[in-house]
Every structure is written in structure tokens, then in C-alpha cells.
Image: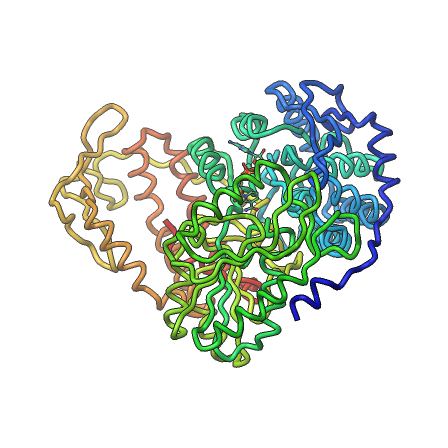
């Protein structure tokens, strides 16, 4: 059978690249940044290549500190005007952007395929329509902003850094919610794949997007760092590798910048003993050979019930042989080229050094001449500790291991530092859901994989990052609660020993820790002195050690009743806390003044805004309606 398929030949059906080449030629194949509604003079040029042939495609500008500075300044200058538009006015702009993608769908699809190396079939049927859909969907949120997101304002100027695996789609995921909700943007595309971002910006300007609202700065990681470090940026949204995500988190820590990270994954693909094997095999094709496996949520770890493992492997190896690899613009092709020689080298090295002796099966395809190519690959009998099983390969390589019981499948599936996605395959829906519910992942698919929609939040847990993109929940990543701007409390009487029955004499007792619903003496019996700004001791608090932290985490972990409580019940408790805080507001304000030296007014306002925050979130708890799309609960928040 394998030979039969291998012999089967198809006539190539290439899509014309004339329009895309003409667009490139129209720019002399040389691009500046897109700042304040226009291209800048090209400078500090570097080459971008065609992955399928290795030929140079265009010259791009490297983003210096000055370039980033200009872009941020343009975004800042446009911020008030953009945020000041009514939601329905911004919605019209987003509709126009979406329509512009639709009208130029072929140009985008071809340019993306040439620039990234992925097959046209995917850019045409997935990347481009989904990008348009994201803009359209978020036009809806803009339209509803005043009613749905009352009490929130835009974050401000947002720096967005995106990877090369879905260049236009990731742009849409980032830009659509940001712009819809009134933010202005400086986006840095990946250095290998910047062209569709530049085309999008050019068309956006033609579609009437006010200048400065969307700025594109090209360049590599150094440019990304300039953007992350820029003082004028209010939020960073990043998609890419975990290592860079960590670097960004460290660099933004303490800066006051908001942050969302969508990082790597090593997602389990769990095939239970009663799965429809042919369906699951097709699932693997979509999970790991789609986009050459360069997908953050790729189902790259196949966990297969022992009882069916041999049959599954045989079918998978046979199916693998039938995949067509070739020029991205050929519409009969299943797999295209790897984005860059650097990525090809990473894949090759990890497979060569990280399989720990497990058998590596490459599909017997002929790799095209030139360019960066890697065949569909399956590694079987993999040990869960082998690097190919633990590390993100980010290429068309699946690893397979077996399990005996669903419980073992869950353990293997969760045995990873990542938590982006998972899929479960079974003909018994109850069985599938029982396993799915135990998987630690942001998204779990049942009898399907890599399914996306703009209305569904997407994002990770653990080292796969945090924050959601898409849906209502994703909107909150681009909003910030409006600070309390109601009347400030009456000036408080200065703390003079005792006010209104509040004892403010020097606190002579040590405040204990609060763990598991009661006060707890610190394990080490140590305390630390709290001093006021003048250095005068005003009290003692318990000093928690490792054991106290462990107890506290265990108590939080054990409090499963909280998640199980109804949203209404949680809302009531939050209201109750808010009410109690309001009754004792003066006391809290005095304590703040004593600890920090803040003025009475400032301390009073602080307490008021805390109360307000609790009330607002009590209301959210009551109104939570995102559960349909994604679980509202993220486990322990630290
Ligand atoms: P990367 O994480 O280095 O690049 C992603 C983006 O971040 C690019 O725009 C890049 O220019 C920028 N960047 C790089 N260093 C930066 C820094 N220090 N500060 C700010 N921005 C920075 O991804 P790379 O090197 O292209 O791929 C490496 C590995 O990352 C891949 O093999 C894969 O495992 C993983 N990856 C995961 C992706 C995902 O969607 N989760 C996407 C791309 C890569």
C-alpha cells in the first residue's frame, strides 16, 4: 500500500505569484518601518529570504532605539484621539481592515506562502480568513465597548512582538483586540517574516486608519528588546519562545508595564483504546504536520493506548508516506519549507541528539533542492524523559509513547513544564471528557485538534505563558479598570492615639500569618519589624519561611470548594468583604498612613479604590459568562 501511494503522482498546480512579486517590486524590494502612517527611509538593512529556495526576497530595516522611539511617539500622539472615538467608530475601522484583508486575500495568501514557506493551501484557507475573522469579531467588541466594558479604559500604547509561524494571523490576534478597545500599537514582526505585516499596515492606511494608530518596526530580537525596554510603552504582548518570554518578564518586572505571554508547548495528543483510529491518524496530520509542525499548540506528544499502539503506528506510518512536500505555491502540496536554516538546524540537532536511541521514522519523500526542508517524522518507543519528548522541537516531528490506563495517560500528558493545549481521542464521550478534565492545559480539544476561532480564548498555563487571546476574555488583556475617580473621602483626622474607637497606639502584638482560614504562628517563630518612613518601629509581623509557604499553597490547593461554588455565591462573599472593608475604612487608612507616611487623603483614596475594586469584581463574579468559551479558573494565583 505504501508503495502504491508513493508512486502516485500529481500534476503541480501552482498559484501565480505575479501580484505579490509586483508589490515587492513596487517597493524596490526594500522596506523601511511603517511609522505614523507612512514608510520611513530604509536603513540598517538586512535580508529576508524565501525559505523554499533560499533566495533573497527583500531587504528590511533593522529597528534601532531611535526607530522604536519614533514609533512609540507616533502611537502616543495618536492614543488620545483613538481612545476618544466612540466604540462604534472604531468598529467601523476594524470592519474596514477586515474587508481590506478579504479584498486582498490572494495577495496576502501568496505573499505569506513565499515569505514563510508554508503551503498556499494553508495561508489561503486558514491564515488569511482567520485573520479577517479576528478583525471582524473584534469590531463587534468595539461596537459593544461602552456597554460591555463599562468601568474599563484602554491600556494605552501597546508593544507587540510576534513570531514567524503565523505572521499575519498573529498580527491579527494582537492588533484586533488592541485597536478595537482603544489602544494604539507598535508591532514588531519576526525578522524572517515581516512582509505581510508591512502590507497590512500599508493597506490599513489606505483604508483610512488614522496615522500613528498602528506602527510596524522591523528587526530582530535586539529591536524587540528596545520595544520591551521603552519607557513609553504601557503593555507588552508577546508570542514566541519560552526563553524570550522569560527574558521579557524579567525586563518588564517592576516597570508597571502590563504583560501577556503566549509561549511554547509540548502538547499531548491522547489516543484512548476505543478511538476511531483513522480519525485520530488524520488528527495527527493536523496536529503535527500542519504548518511543518511549527505550531505552538502542535500535538507533538502522541500518547497511545497500548492495546491499539501497533495498529495506530502502522496506519500513521502509512499515512505519513502520502504527505506531499513541495513548493508552497503548489496547491497540491501538504507541507512546505521550514522557515529558516536556523530553525532547520534546531530541528535536525534535537532529533539527532535527543531521541536517546528511540527509532526515528522519516517519511520517504524526496526533499526539494535548495531551501530548508525537513520530512514528516515519527519517533516511536520514546522514553518520557528523552529530550525529544520533553523539549519543543517546533518542526514536523511527532514522538510516540504508550500507556496502559487512562490514569497513566493523564500522568504522562501532564508530565511537562508546558500547558498550552491537549487533545483527547475516544469514541466514548464520557471517557474523553473524564480525561480532558484532568489535563493541565489552556485549551483541550476532544476528537479534534488545532481548531481556532476568534470568539474562543486561547492561551497557556505553566511555561506556556499567561493571558488569553480571542473572545471576551481576551479583551480584558487590552483594558484596565478605571481608577476610582469618585469623591475622595473626607480628610481623616490625624491618628492621635485613638480615633473613633480605633486603637492606634504602637502595635505591640505580632500580626500572625493567615493560612487555611485562621491565624497561624510562623513556623520559624521569627518576626520582622515594620518601620514607618521615619524609621520608627510601628509593629511586628510574622516572617514566613518555606514551610509556611508550603502550608499556604497546600491550603489554597485544598480549597476546591471555592472553584466549585456558584459564581453568585463567590460574588456574595466578595461583596461581604467589600462591605466589611468599608465599615473599617478609617482604620485601614490610618494604618496605611502610619506605615507609609502617605497623606490622609491619599490613604483614604487608596482604601476607597480597594473597596471599589472588590465591588467591581464581585459584580464580575456574578456576571461571569466566559465559562462557555474557556474555564475562568486558573488554579492557584500567586
Ligand atoms: P523567538 O522567541 O526568539 O522570536 C519571537 C519574536 O521575539 C521575534 O519577533 C523575535 O525577533 C523576538 N525576540 C527575540 N528575542 C527577543 C528579546 N530578547 N526581546 C524581545 N523580543 C525578542 O523565537 P525564535 O528564536 O524564532 O524560535 C526559537 C524557538 O522558539 C523555536 O524553535 C520554537 O521552539 C519557539 N517558538 C515558539 C513560538 C510559539 O508560537 N509559541 C513561535 C516561534 C518560536
- Where residue 72 sits: x, y (%)? 63, 27
Drawn side of residue 300 relative to residue 371, left or right: left
Viewer-proximal residue among 264 and 83: 264
Way the structure is coloured: rainbow
Viewer-proximal residue among 531 and 134: 134
Q: What residue do we see at 40% from left, 67% from top? A: 410
Furthest-left residue in view?
A: 525
Q: Quadrant of the N terminus?
A: bottom right
Q: Is residue 619 visible?
A: no
- Where residue 594 sits: x, y (%)? 28, 33
Q: Is residue 45 visible?
A: yes
Q: How many marks?
A: 0
- Where residue 611 sits: x, y (%)? 42, 49
Drawn side of residue 598 relative to residue 20, left or right: left
- Where residue 101 sits: x, y (%)? 80, 47
* Ligand 1 quadrant assignment: top right
- 262 is higher (above) or lower (below) than 234: below
Viewer-proximal residue among 592 and 3: 3
- 166 is higher (above) or lower (below) than 251: below
Image quadrant where residue 371 sits: top right
Drawn side of residue 149 relative to residue 43, left or right: left
Q: What residue do we see at 83% from left, 50% from top? A: 14
Image quadrant where residue 565 sits: bottom left
Q: What residue do we see at 61% from left, 40% from top? A: 162
Amino acid at each position: 500500500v505504501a508503495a502504491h501511494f508513493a508512486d502516485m503522482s500529481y500534476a503541480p498546480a501552482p498559484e501565480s505569484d505575479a501580484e505579490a512579486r509586483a508589490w515587492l517590486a513596487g517597493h524596490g524590494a526594500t522596506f523601511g518601518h511603517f511609522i505614523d502612517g507612512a514608510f520611513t527611509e530604509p536603513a540598517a538593512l538586512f535580508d529576508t529570504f524565501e525559505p523554499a529556495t533560499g533566495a533573497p526576497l527583500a531587504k528590511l530595516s533593522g529597528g534601532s532605539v531611535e526607530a522604536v522611539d519614533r514609533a512609540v511617539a507616533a502611537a502616543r500622539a495618536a492614543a488620545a484621539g483613538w481612545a476618544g472615538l466612540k466604540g462604534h467608530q472604531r468598529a467601523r475601522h476594524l470592519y474596514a481592515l477586515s474587508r481590506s484583508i478579504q479584498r486582498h486575500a490572494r495577495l496576502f495568501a501568496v505573499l505569506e506562502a513565499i515569505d514563510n514557506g508554508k503551503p498556499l493551501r494553508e495561508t489561503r484557507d486558514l491564515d488569511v480568513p482567520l485573520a479577517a475573522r479576528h478583525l471582524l469579531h473584534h469590531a463587534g467588541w468595539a461596537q459593544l465597548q461602552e456597554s460591555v466594558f463599562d468601568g474599563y479604559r484602554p491600556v494605552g500604547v501597546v508593544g507587540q512582538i510576534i513570531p514567524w509561524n503565523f505572521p499575519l494571523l498573529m498580527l491579527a490576534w494582537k492588533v484586533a483586540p488592541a485597536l478595537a478597545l482603544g489602544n494604539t500599537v507598535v508591532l514588531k514582526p519576526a525578522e524572517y517574516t515581516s512582509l505581510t505585516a508591512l502590507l497590512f499596515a500599508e493597506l490599513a492606511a489606505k483604508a483610512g486608519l488614522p496615522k500613528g494608530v498602528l506602527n510596524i518596526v522591523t528587526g530582530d530580537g535586539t529591536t524587540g528588546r528596545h520595544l520591551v525596554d521603552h519607557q513609553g510603552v504601557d503593555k507588552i504582548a508577546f508570542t514566541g519562545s519560552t526563553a524570550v518570554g522569560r527574558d521579557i518578564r524579567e525586563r518588564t518586572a517592576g516597570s508597571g508595564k502590563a504583560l501577556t505571554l503566549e509561549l511554547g508547548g509540548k502538547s499531548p495528543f491522547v489516543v484512548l483504546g476505543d478511538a476511531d483510529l483513522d480519525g485520530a491518524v488524520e488528527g495527527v496530520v493536523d496536529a503535527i504536520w500542519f504548518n511543518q509542525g511549527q505550531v505552538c499548540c502542535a500535538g507533538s506528544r502522541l500518547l497511545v493506548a497500548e492495546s491499539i499502539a501497533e495498529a495506530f503506528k502502522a496506519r500513521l506510518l502509512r499515512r505519513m508516506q502520502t504527505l506531499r512536500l513541495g513548493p508552497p505555491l503548489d496547491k497540491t502540496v501538504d507541507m512546505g519549507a521550514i522557515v529558516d536554516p536556523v530553525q532547520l538546524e534546531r530541528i535536525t540537532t534535537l532529533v539527532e541528539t535527543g531521541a536517546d536511541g528511540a527509532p526515528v521514522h522519516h517519511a520517504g519523500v524526496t526533499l526539494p533542492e535548495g531551501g530548508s526542508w525537513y520530512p514528516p517524522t515519527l519517533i516511536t518507543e520514546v522514553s518520557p524523559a528523552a529530550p525529544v519528548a520533553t523539549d519543543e522541537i517546533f518542526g514536523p516531528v511527532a514522538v510516540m509513547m504508550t500507556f496502559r490506563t487512562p490514569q497513566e495517560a493523564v500522568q504522562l500528558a501532564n508530565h511537562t513544564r508546558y500547558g498550552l493545549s491537549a487533545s483527547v481521542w475516544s469514541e466514548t464521550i464520557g471517557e474523553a471528557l473524564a480525561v480532558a478534565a484532568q489535563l493541565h492545559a489552556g485549551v483541550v480539544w476532544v476528537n479534534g485538534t488545532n481548531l481556532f476561532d476568534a470568539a474562543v480564548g486561547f492561551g497557556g498555563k505553566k511555561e506556556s505563558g499567561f493571558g488569553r487571546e480571542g473572545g471576551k476574555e481576551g479583551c480584558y488583556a487590552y483594558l484596565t479598570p478605571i481608577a476610582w475617580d469618585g469623591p475622595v473621602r473626607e480628610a481623616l483626622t490625624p491618628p492621635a492615639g485613638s480615633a473613633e474607637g480605633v486603637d492606634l497606639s504602637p502595635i505591640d502584638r505580632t500580626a500572625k500569618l493567615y493560612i487555611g482560614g485562621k491565624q497561624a504562628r510562623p513556623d520559624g517563630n521569627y518576626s520582622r519589624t515594620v518601620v514607618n518612613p521615619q524609621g520608627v518601629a510601628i509593629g511586628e509581623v510574622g516572617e514566613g519561611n518555606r514551610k509556611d509557604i508550603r502550608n499556604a499553597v497546600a491550603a489554597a490547593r485544598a480549597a476546591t470548594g471555592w472553584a466549585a461554588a456558584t459564581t453568585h455565591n463567590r460574588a456574595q462573599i466578595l461583596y461581604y468583604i467589600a462591605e466589611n472593608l468599608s465599615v473599617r475604612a478609617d482604620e485601614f487608612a490610618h494604618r496605611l498612613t502610619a506605615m507609609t507616611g502617605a497623606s490622609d487623603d491619599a490613604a483614604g483614596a487608596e482604601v476607597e479604590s480597594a473597596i471599589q475594586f472588590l465591588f467591581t469584581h464581585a459584580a464580575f463574579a456574578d456576571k461571569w459568562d466566559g465559562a462557555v468559551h474557556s474555564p475562568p479558573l486558573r488554579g492557584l494565583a500567586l
